[in-house]
Image (cartoon, rainbow, N blue to C red):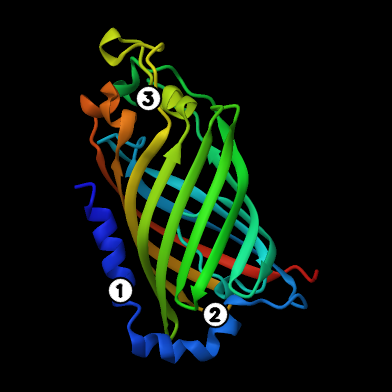
Amino acid sequence: MRCVAYLAGLAACLALSSPDRAQAQSSDYTTLTSPQSAQNWYLTVGAGLRYQPDYTGSDDYVFRARPIISLGRGLKSTWWSAEDDPTLTIGFFSGQGWRVGFSGELLWKRKADVNPALVAVPETKFGAEAGGFVEFYPTSWLRARADLRRGIVAHDALVADFKLDAFQRIGAWTIGAGPRMSVVGADYLRTYYGSYTAGGGGLLKRFNAGVHTVGAIAQATYNWTDQISTTAYVEYKYLVGDAAQAPIVKTWGSRNSFTFGVSASYAFDTGFR
């Protein structure tokens, strides 16, 4: 099962990257991936609704809302935007085929009175993750992105996300898909998967930093105008490493999880360069 996500993502990338397609898009490579310094800053705001596991590794599904905030030079369509990108993204620097900036994510409080499976797990605090990202476009249809963030209040660990997306613009539609991998520090695992029970190793159990999840995402976006767009998507994750052996996953949950979601966003010119 852990190979399914990679195979699905790589197959999608290959399907979208035929020689004819690459040749057809070569002429607009600069337009799609090279915002000029003269372009104004655009702010993209929106909201989404997800049907997802209560926590990564849970087999209980819930609806959750998600805000969208992104700031960068050029319209949102200039750069590829995936639905699993962090809640807050600010692209400070960009050039031909690359972008670097701030990456931020919110972490919600988790309590046992919401999910009985969490009775033997300490409550987690509301917090955030803050750091940076770098993304590179080797061609106009392929994005490689890496995020590195550190926990604030909720946990004290580094979290790294690695993404590869192949995408295609067809009229007003944009479709894309690609594989995912997440790597987390030991304190993240201890915070979200540590247990009071001796059977789970207790809170003194040693957790090892490493790969946390592998998966893939596929999404379809309809651009009503240059500023307004709506998106539907599905994401798959497979839990690996020490977290997969935690009681809240092994006994009460599942290593396999799916997320289904929709979102709407609006991009507008701030008037600043």
Place of residue 177 in the rendered image (x, y in percent of width and height, measured from the top left): 36, 66
User: Residue placed farthest to the top in the image?
Assistant: 198
> Which of label 2 and label 1 is nearer to you?
1
The part of the image, by quadrant, that contains residue 69 is: bottom right
Mark 3: amino acid: Tyr
- Secondary structure at badge 3 equals helix
Tell me what residue is drawn at x 26 percent, y 22 percent: 247
User: Residue 59 at x, y = what percent?
Assistant: 25, 36
Other-residue count near label 2 (Cα within 10 Å), few / some / many at <14 / 14–19 / ≥20: few
Position of the C terminus, as image quadrant, is bottom right
Going from N to C along the chain, the mark reached first, 1 or 3, is 1
Q: In the displayed structure, would residue 212 be above or below residue 50?
A: above
Of callouts 2 and 1, which one flags the residue occurring earlier in the amino acid sequence?
Answer: 1
Name the residue type under label 2.
Thr
Q: Quadrant of residue 195?
A: top left
Q: Position of residue 26 (x, y in %)?
A: 49, 88
- Residue, disc 1: 14
Residue at the image point whose x is 31% and y is 10% from the top: 197
Q: CA distance from mark 2 to mark 1?
A: 29 Å
Numbered tag placed on residue 225 in the rendering: 2
